[in-house]
Image: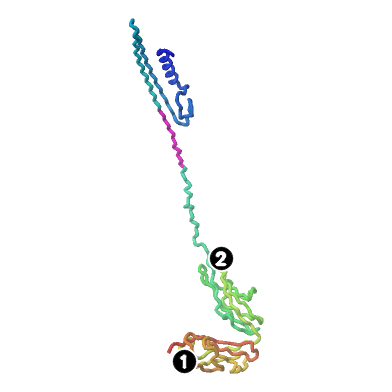
Amino acid sequence: MPSQKTYLKNLILVGLMCSLPFFGCGSEADGGPNGDDAGADSDTDTDTDTDTDSDTDTGADGDSDTDTDSDSDADSDTDSDSDSDTDGDTDADSDADSDADADSDSDSDSDVNSVPVAEIEEPENGDYFKAGDAIEFVGSGTDIEDGALTGAALTWKAGSAAFGTGETVSHSLSAGDHVISLEAKDSQGAVGKAAIIIHVVSNLPPECVILEPDDGDSFEEGQTVYFQAECTDPEGETIDPNKIVWTSSLEGPLGTGSTTQATLNNVGSHDIEVCAEDPTDPNLDGCDEISIFVIVD
């Protein structure tokens, strides 16, 4: 068994060895004696003071007194400066001031040119004309920027064939149905268009005009109404009175002849029509129409 002195010497030696940095007497959390300094400064001061006084007195009486004083000061200062200056100044000065002001000044400076408006005043849509007869065409054109359009700015066409320019044009057409258009062109080339259909025939249909009642008249329910019309044939032929027929949109047939009368029992708006058959062509007729009202008694 080693003596107390030898034991104390070993204890002092171990203490001194542990004070040296390359001896790992404890488990360092920084991964070993020379731990990875991942940007953290770690200062470790270990002061170990070991004072050992050993006095052994052996008297002649065989008594042995041993005084042992062992002072072990282990000062361990650990300064861990972990200045992880994460000043990652992400001054990503998103100077992507994506000028969403992207001067979206899409100068829509109302520089858009308006389209002219064309209007056909004569003839009316659906009118009949005899082949070879001169037909008078009347129309107009207006434009916001240019004002009234005249002369060459107005072009008349039958189908795709132009037949005149200006506000008034006289022109004859062959037999058949014709699409008549008026094109109005402004100073910037924009074109506005109006169109109608007219019928050019060898035999014109009869012409009828309702004389009584007047358009818009009102009558009481169950009242007898007198009807009168004038129907003529453009070629001078006589029209058979039985071929002049009156009808109501609510009552149905009302009678025949230039004059007739009928009792109106249905309350509401009546479209009254009179048609005359052409003396030479039974498939051709001429008509006129008005609206009247029947109200509750």
Given the image, on which type of amino acid does mark 2 rest?
Answer: Gln
**Mark 2 and 1 residues: CB-CB less than 8 Å, in contact?**
no
Q: Main secondary structure of the magenta part?
A: loop
Residue 69 part of the magenta segment: no
Where is residue 208, by image quadrant? bottom right
> Which of the two residues, 103 or 155, is positioned nearer the viewer here?
103
The image shows residue 230, relative to residue 13, as above or below, that is below
Q: Amino acid at mark 1?
A: Gly
Mark 2 lies on a secondary structure that is: loop
Left or right: 92 as drawn, with respect to 63: right
Q: Marks 2 and 1: which is nearer the front? A: 1
Q: Position of residue 265 (x, y in %)?
A: 48, 90
Instruction: Please give the range of residues in magenta.
Output: 79-91
The crowd level at tag 2 (other Cα within 10 Å; few <14, some 14-19, many 20+) is few
Q: Residue at x 60, y 92 (%)?
A: 243
Identify the residue position indicated by label 2 in the image.
Answer: 188
Quadrant location, the C terminus: bottom left
How far from the left and from the top, in percent, is residue 283? 64, 87
Quarter the N terminus occupies: top left
Q: Which mark is residue 222?
A: 1
Residue 110 as seen in the image, left or right of residue 50:
right
Residue 169 image point, x, y percent: 59, 78
**Number of disc labels:** 2
Residue 89 among magenta residues: yes
Q: Residue at x 39, y 24 (%)?
A: 76
Secondary structure beneath label 1: loop
